[in-house]
Image (spheres, rainbow, N blue to C red):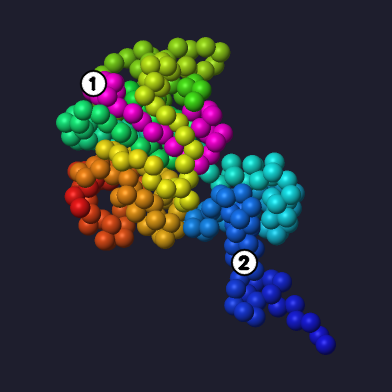
Amino acid sequence: MAVSLAGTEGVGPHGQDLEELELELLLEAIYRRYGFDFRGYATASLRRRVWRRTHLESLTTITALHERVLHDEAVLDRLLKDLSINVTEMFRDPSFHLALRERAFPLLRTYPFLRIWNAGCSTGEEAYSLAIALHETGLLERARIYATDMNESALAQARGGAFALERMQDYTVNYQRAGGERSFSEYYAARGGAAFFDPELARNIVFAQHNLATDRSFNEFHLIVCRNVMIYFGRELQRHVHELFLDSLAPLGLLALGRKEAIAPAEIAARYEALDAAEKLFRRSG
Ligand SMILES: C[S@@+](CC[C@H](N)C(=O)[O-])C[C@H]1O[C@@H](n2cnc3c(N)ncnc32)[C@H](O)[C@@H]1O
């Protein structure tokens, strides 16, 4: 009997694209074997990154990468790095930080103790920026910033509190545009190509691993900052994370998403009022 080869390339007899199937099986395997859940991520960017890793490992199919990932954790680590895009900077998008300072912080002033969740904090630049702005507005002493990410090696860097010295010029400009009131260099000491930030800033920051796709709410917060994270998620996962945030926000708590994120679907958006529509800064109303 002739064996049909339909299905080795393109769309098979059951209608599923082979590449899509291989990608699904890879993500399922990573989840079942290691607990990292990328199954709800937006496919286009995920597919690009998986192919890049496949080629860098000198392989030619996603299935070959799948086999390697299951048997060699070093390959898994490299793939995880590719999939968790860690690009960040201090006072990134200064207009966002200005909006926080001018619109959110005055509302937070009314609380005797502040719990802030910086979800998807990457290597810590965002958490340090928040700490500096809170310090300058007299709120840092009463605040605790829970800065979380799924990527443990990004968190290890964050805990070190040192960032590349060569970035400080750009960060100084960002800081000034974000409403910074001092000389930015007051906050760090330069040593051996790195800028070591004042440990006092980190005293109220807790860096911890948390996966938005699989972990639960762990506290009630007055402010949640989550920027440039959900843009990589598919719709269902975005909804899941928005539900997690609603579970984690105090009544009248603030949600700060930044320009690139969207607040959707409509029934979630209806639970908030906008404090700054362009910067996607919201206050929980229901
Ligand atoms: C592009 S960085 C954004 C960093 C920072 N928020 C900013 O805007 O500069 C995205 C971060 O989200 C993290 N991330 C991606 N998926 C995640 C998940 N499911 N749970 C927690 N963090 C996640 C990545 O590890 C990465 O550090």
Judging depth in this view, the residue of 117 and 44 nearest the camera is 117
Judging depth in this view, the residue of 229 and 190 nearest the camera is 229
* Circle 1: element type: loop
Question: Count the marks: how many?
Answer: 2
Mark seen at residue 13:
none
* Circle 2: element type: helix
Place of residue 244 in the rendered image (x, y in percent of width and height, measured from the top left):
36, 50
The residue singled out by tag 1 in the image is 138
Residue stretch rendered in magenta on the structure: 134-158
For residue 271, which quarter of the picture?
bottom left
Please report the residue visible at 54 percent of the width from the left and 29 percent of the height from the top.
156
Q: Is residue 155 left or right of residue 187?
A: right
Indicate the amino acid at tag 2. Leu
For the question of whether residue 214 can be seen, the reply is: yes
For the question of whether residue 95 can be seen, the reply is: no
Cα distance between the residues tagged 2 and 1 = 53 Å
Q: Is 221 part of what is drawn in magenta?
A: no
Q: Is 144 part of what is drawn in magenta?
A: yes
Judging depth in this view, the residue of 120 and 276 nearest the camera is 120
Please report the residue visible at 20 percent of the width from the left and 44 percent of the height from the top.
252
Place of residue 33 in the rendered image (x, y in percent of width and height, measured from the top left):
64, 52
Location of residue 176 with respect to 39 vertically, above or below: above
Whether residues under marks 2 and 1 lie with C-beta atoms below 8 angstroms apart, the answer is: no
The residue singled out by tag 2 in the image is 21
Place of residue 87 in the rendered image (x, y in percent of width and height, measured from the top left):
48, 37
Indicate the amino acid at tag 1. Gly
Q: Is residue 24 left or right of residue 97?
A: right
Please report the residue visible at 42 percent of the width from the left and 50 percent of the height from the top.
231
**Could you classify mark 1 by the number of other residues whose Cα lies within 10 Å: few (under 14), some (14-19), or many (20 or more)?**
few
Q: Is residue 275 left or right of residue 246?
A: left
Location of residue 267 with respect to 131 vertically, above or below: below
